[in-house]
């Protein structure tokens, strides 16, 4: 081989070495980026950790805040609002009752016929959208609602005085079981001159204007309606929880424990308290930098801290924030950082679908990444990473919701702590059977969430006490429950025997 041949060979060898060096460098860089993604995942998982010891701290913090909220208005992040509901349906109700369920830009009117023995004989429901032009004044809004109810009622063709339950799913300060003033509009819904007004009175006046002989006998929110429906079927129901797009809870409290209203008397010795638990906060809650970022981008900054960790409105957004940071710092999603920068582009139903994808190649995860997050191609290991993030967000939310439920049970003395052995070795009374009515898309429609919540209840309470607790799924507490409360509080019903006792 001549000198020229050696030169060519040497040049080829050098080029090969250079190419190999570039490939090695790229692989090293890729491994470094992947390690960074895994490190972010582990950091997030550690930040969201909810071991039983931490959940018990959350339980105790919830109880402390409940006591503080019952002692004085403004004394706690928990508002602990009085509902003036001191009797719940018990299955003896009979007759025809109506309800209006107003919680957004659509509302529903309902008619239920009930018979003795917790039997709903007949039920009819109609939905109606509220035209945007009718959201200018409270008179326009309530006139439209009243006219819709009038048309609905007149289809029955019967002329008799009727009782009406009004579910109004916005913050209200109640003055009685059938009246309350709007504190503020939420959920993007706004009719300017309504704040501060008695919304039940506004509806009653509109009903009178349109000539309909029906009046509001019960003004409730959706959580109280859920409790009423649960109690109608099972008198051991002492609390209700909604975990859907938003979250809230209510429960039956002894009137003598409501310190901020000393001297409050009820026929039953108890009253339903609307906790507004979405606003609960404690330093024991596992808050991460992503939760802080989420809070910063919301209109109600520094409010609804518990809700932002456990409700469907926010879970997908928490996952998106994690994915976006990974896209920025690890490049595992290629050039997808821009598409992941859009707030709330990942909804919780998509998060749930990805978490529950059990196909070998995670094809549903791939579809959602491509179609909704504009990530054209993600290898299988990256898709597994996405599923893990969805799992972490779901698990933390479900376990914190469980801690909230146990907080209510502990406040009521139904968590089993009163049944532990005393220092003398004697055992106190065993915990009573307890039913919590539960409603909402996360618990009802997301099996993994339900599984994690149920699992956490056993971890916190212990198996023996957990067996005394039943979470009963209810359907349409905001509608049917409100109509049943109208039955309990109607003049005919009160004359007959009153509602079911609370304590």
Image: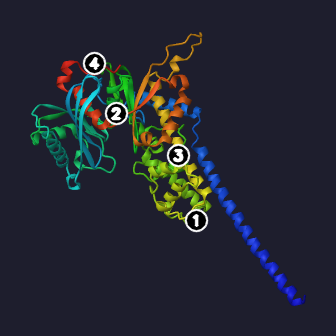
Q: Name the residue at the front extreme.
A: 360
According to the picture, the residue beneath numbered tag 2 turns out to be 226
Residue 347: % across, % down: 44, 52
Mark 1, secondary structure of its residue: loop
Residue 279: % across, % down: 42, 39
- Rendered residue at 17%/49% (across/down): 140
According to the picture, the residue beneath numbered tag 4 turns out to be 267
The mark nearer the N terminus, 3 or 4, is: 4
| 256 lies above or below 76 | above
Mark 2, secondary structure of its residue: helix
**How much space separates mark 1 and mark 3, taking CA atoms?**
23 Å
Circle 2/circle 4 CB separation < 8 Å: no
According to the picture, the residue beneath numbered tag 3 turns out to be 393
Crowd around label 4: few <14 · some 14–19 · many ≥20 (10 Å): few
The mark nearer the N terminus, 2 or 3, is: 2
Q: Nearer the viewer, residue 101 or 84?
A: 101
Residue 153: % across, % down: 15, 39
Q: Is residue 500 left or right of residue 349?
A: left
Q: Nearer the viewer, mark 2 or mark 4?
A: 2
- Report the number of numbered marks: 4
Crowd around label 3: few <14 · some 14–19 · many ≥20 (10 Å): many
**How much space separates mark 2 and mark 4, taking CA atoms?**
22 Å
According to the picture, the residue beneath numbered tag 1 turns out to be 334
Whether residue 270 appears in this view of the structure is yes
Q: Answer with the quarter of the image where residue 425 lies.
A: top right
Circle 1/circle 4 CB separation < 8 Å: no
The mark nearer the N terminus, 2 or 4, is: 2
The mark nearer the N terminus, 2 or 1, is: 2
């Amino acid at each position: 081989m001549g000198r020229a041949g050696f030169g060519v060979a040497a040049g080829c060898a050098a080029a090969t070495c250079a190419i190999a060096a570039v490939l090695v460098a790229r692989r090293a860089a890729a491994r470094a980026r992947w390690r960074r993604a895994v490190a972010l995942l582990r950091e997030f998982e550690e930040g969201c950790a909810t071991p039983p010891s931490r959940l018990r701290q959350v339980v105790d913090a919830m109880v402390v805040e409940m006591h503080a909220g019952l002692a004085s208005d403004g004394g706690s992040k928990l508002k602990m609002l009085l509902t003036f509901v001191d009797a719940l349906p018990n299955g003896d109700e009979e007759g025809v009752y109506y309800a209006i369920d107003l919680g957004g830009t659509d509302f529903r009117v309902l008619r239920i016929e009930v018979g003795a023995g917790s039997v709903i004989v007949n039920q009819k429901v109609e939905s109606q959208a509220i035209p945007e032009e009718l959201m200018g004044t409270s008179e326009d809004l309530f006139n439209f609602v009243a006219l819709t109810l009038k048309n609905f009622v007149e289809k029955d063709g019967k002329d008799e005085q009727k009782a009406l339950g009004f579910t109004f799913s916005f913050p209200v300060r109640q003055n009685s079981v059938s009246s309350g003033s709007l504190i503020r509009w939420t959920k993007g819904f706004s009719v300017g001159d309504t704040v501060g007004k008695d919304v039940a009175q506004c509806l009653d006046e509109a009903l009178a204007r349109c000539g309909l002989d029906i009046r509001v006998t019960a003004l409730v929110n959706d959580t109280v309606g859920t409790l009423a429906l649960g109690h109608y079927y099972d008198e051991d129901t002492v609390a209700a929880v909604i975990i859907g797009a938003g979250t809230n809870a209510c429960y039956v409290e002894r009137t003598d424990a409501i310190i901020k209203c000393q001297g409050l008397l009820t026929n039953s010795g108890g009253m339903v308290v609307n906790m507004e638990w979405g606003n609960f906060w404690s330093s024991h809650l596992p808050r991460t930098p992503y939760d802080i970022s989420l809070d910063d981008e919301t209109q109600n900054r520094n409010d609804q801290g518990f809700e932002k960790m456990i409700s469907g409105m926010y879970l997908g957004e928490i996952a998106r924030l994690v994915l976006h940071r990974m896209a920025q710092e690890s490049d595992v999603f290629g050039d997808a950082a821009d598409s992941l920068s859009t707030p709330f582009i990942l909804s919780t139903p998509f998060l749930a679908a990805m978490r529950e994808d059990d196909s070998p190649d995670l094809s549903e995860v791939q579809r959602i990444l491509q179609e909704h997050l504009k990530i054209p191609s993600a290898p299988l290991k990256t898709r597994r990473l996405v599923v893990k993030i969805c799992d972490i967000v779901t698990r933390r939310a479900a376990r914190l919701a469980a801690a909230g439920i146990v907080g209510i049970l502990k406040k009521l003395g139904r968590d089993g702590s009163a049944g532990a052995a005393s220092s003398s070795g004697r055992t106190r009374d065993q915990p009573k059977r307890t039913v919590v009515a539960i409603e909402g898309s996360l618990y009802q429609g997301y099996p993994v969430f339900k599984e994690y919540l149920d699992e956490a209840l056993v971890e916190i309470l212990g198996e023996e006490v957990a067996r005394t607790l039943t979470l009963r799924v209810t359907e349409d507490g905001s509608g049917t429950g409100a109509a049943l409360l109208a039955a309990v509080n109607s003049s005919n019903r009160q004359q007959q025997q009153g509602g079911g006792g609370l304590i």
